Amino acid sequence: MKLLSKQVASHMKCDDGKAYCAAPVNIHRIDWFWANKKVLDSNGIKMPKSWAEFNAAADKLQAKGIIPLAHGSQPWQDATVFEAVALGIGGNDFYKKAFVDADIATLSGSTMVKVFDQMRKLKGYTDAGSPGRDWNVATGMVMEGKAAFQLMGDWAKGEFAAAGLKPDVDYYCAATPSNNGYLYNVDSFIFFKVKGKEKVEGQKLLASLIMGKEFQKVFNIYKGSIPARLDVSMDEFDKCAKQSNSDLNTAAKKGGLLPSFAHGMTLELGIKGAIQDVVTEHFNSNMSSQDAVKKIAAAVKAAS
Amino acid sequence: MYWLKRNLPRLVIAPSFGVIAWFVYGFIFWTIYISFTKSKLLPNYEYWGIDQYFRLWSMPRWHVAVENLFIFTTLFIIFCVFIGIVLAILLDQKIRAEGFLRTIYLYPMALSFIVTGTAWRWILNPSLGLEKFMQDVGFETFTFDWLVTPGMSIYTIVIAGVWQSSGFIMAIFLAGLRSVDDEIIKAAKIDGAGLVAVYSKIILPMMRPVFMSAIVILVHLAIKSYDLVIALTAGGPGISSDMPAVFMTQMAFHRSEIGLASASAIMMFLTVSAIVVPYLYSELKREDDRK
Amino acid sequence: MIENKIQTYKDLEKSSNTKKTIYRWILFIILGIFALYYITPLYVMIVTSLKTMEEIRQGNLFSLPGSINFSSWDIAWNGQGFAAGDVFLKTYFWNSVQLVFPAVIISTILGAINGYALTKWRFKGDSYIFLLFLFGTFIPYQAILLPMSRTLGFMGISNSVYGLILVHVVYGLCFTTLFCRNYYISISDEIVKAARIDGAGFFKIFFKIMLPISAPILVVTVIWQFTMIWNDFLFGATFTFGNEAPIQVALNNMVLTSSSVKRYNVDMAAAIIAGFPTLIVYVLAGKYFIRGLTAGSVKG
């Protein structure tokens, strides 16, 4: 019986896929929306199924003086939001061409302009204090009801849990609008070549512990992610995790299971960094979407 | 035995010299060499020409960093020297509280840049720091959100940097002022010169070597600015307060671009050398002339 | 007639005294304003570290705490227990202590011997050698970070306090040699020459003659090295991580990580703890330090 999905397994292999050199502890999903239940319910808003729906809801909230999107503008956070938006606005194939294949034509095309347009809109929904803010402080804003939504990976769930808040009771979790897309990030332990039989035995022991059902279950319940191992029962996981797990399977079948570039699952670090620079610069300035698209294509070319 | 005795000084210096030769100059040459290669995550010793430098100068982020360095260094020098001279002249007026005041003006220098950055980050925080205080006291429309404004964040680094270093510049100017021969001042006063004239026409022109030392030290501090940027703005918002030192670390250790990082480090090295080498040369000439 | 003249003199004296007093007052006011600029951050740090988070939110930057509350100091030093996933300063403070003592002692002793050798025992090429040391004080460390981290890896002391000691001794050597050389060069050669004629050797002269009169420069060198090494961030952040990190790295990590509520009072307490040793050294011995440092740059 297969313990890991093909995709996850491929990330764990080295030597051109011939041997395993890493053990996965979890699968994180990046493209989540977290929302304050009271704020949404009292304003008659549901978790948006499209980006247009999100924008309409955000406008409504802004008119009432509530911050629509809690955000901390650090380069990696800007990139996280960006890739979720790209997935939703551009679609799964677009994402793959742009951020897995680093195809220059896709990066400089009109769809990318639309992605940056939406980023500009999102900037308008954040508050003036967002530059430099830590991600979990932004989560705190949602918890307190100061802000309605946050776009963040599932580790944000850990913050809610630590504060004793429960899904569907205090907060909502839902995927950001996309067509069965699922951006994943796998945390893993890499095993370097070591000398000495004891050390190798130690590595094997650690690997088998990490892959063990119990560890996969307990670790992920606390972490907010879901097990990498396929046959772990999801019964003790909460609603959001169960959702994540079923979405994972759907996305895998429909070709929407894609690695997160903002979290280093695809793209050389130099290229990822170049894209991140343009995204964060655009988000924190008045740069036009056209200029951003030109820059991103040029940056990727230069970094390749 | 005699050979040992005769060469003892050289032998004593040799280990230190060897260490410097290897760890300073040897390493700089290694970095120069790597900047001429295609190295990404690990060194690739194949010669590649100066393409890394082309790549470097074609990156918008590097341009931001260089521009920031220029802005920061200029303002840093101007304010530190101005405040340093003013305070030195004021303290030169034989005040009883001189020792106490000197301690206050100088203690920031004892703190690390991280401590300074942490403290100023708190003070300049828009919602909880100076801005809120002024608003509470009655200046309702007062804003001071430079820390989170892309174009202005570099100036917050100037504020914190000047706070940290201007006391030191004051100290060296004060020592310089004090070393001026009293006779000259007395002669000028007898000739009828007022206090202002004494300072501006006689003492300050004699301070040329002190000016030089101050500027060299300040340029050197500015180019090395890494700790302060990291603690105060982390290079943000976005990349708007990036500096060459921060850029180099990012490229080297987070982007697996050690060839590019080496090129940026060598650019920093060349900039420092361009200022320091002429200075050292002129200083050595002066020493030779005096011999 | 004479009474008039005396009265005029007295009046003139009084008016010039008044002028002097006014000038003095202006002087004090300006000096006072500057003093506020320098003191304010320290005041804010102390005051904030003694408040509770409630007081910080309700009050403003300068308001005094309701009561003196040292709990954030305890959290900064000891942490909040495992669950909060904290960085706390205790371990890293001791890392820096372990680093600073050997590094300062070794680099100072070597600097003194080097300075002595270069100035009292002239040999061919010694000014060029000194020039290389001098230039070494100016280099931006970015130019050596990469090769140094590889070398530390090869030597097996990467991510350890020994690695940091090596790094700080090596790059401190340029400064310590510079300070000691500039000091010894202004000490008359006659004593040394006379001792050599009497048959005293290199080390005997060093220990019996030079060292006893070196107190001023040794104080300067030790304080300089202590401050530089304690306050270092770049080398610490580049060559160590995790539990081996020195204190400034830990401080920065602590300020940058947080739970959903940023604990400004703990951050400020941590900053004071991190800055305390160098501040104390400066307050107690600062004037020797400044005296030594400024003498060099004025004489040129």
Image (cartoon, helix red, strand yellow):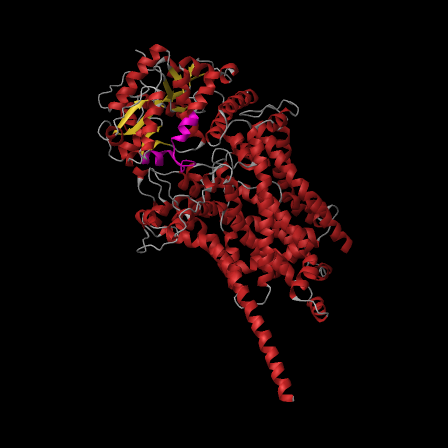
Coordinates of residue B155 in the picture (x, y in percent) = 52, 43
Coordinates of residue A101 in the picture (x, y in percent) = 48, 15
Q: Nearer the viewer, residue C254 or A247?
A: A247
| Residue range of the region highlighted in magenta in the rendering | A119-141
Q: Above or below — where is B97 with respect to B73? A: below
Number of labelled discs? Answer: 0
Q: Above or below — where is B251 with respect to A208? A: below
Q: Is residue A266 in view?
A: no
- Decide if residue C155 is on the left or right side of residue B128: right
The verdict on residue A35 being magenta is: no
Q: Quadrant of residue A83?
A: top left
Instruction: Work out which quarter of the rendered image holds the N terminus of chain A and state it.
Output: top left
Q: Nearer the viewer, residue A101 or C118?
A: A101
Coordinates of residue A240 in the picture (x, y in percent) = 27, 23
Coordinates of residue B227 in the picture (x, y in percent) = 51, 42
Q: Is residue B157 in view?
A: yes
- Decide if residue A157 is on the left or right side of residue B71: left
Q: Residue at x 27, y 18 (%)?
A: A232
Q: Residue at x 64, y 22 (%)?
A: B48
Instruction: Work out which quarter of the rendered image holds the C terminus of chain A and state it.
Output: top right
The verdict on residue A124 being magenta is: yes
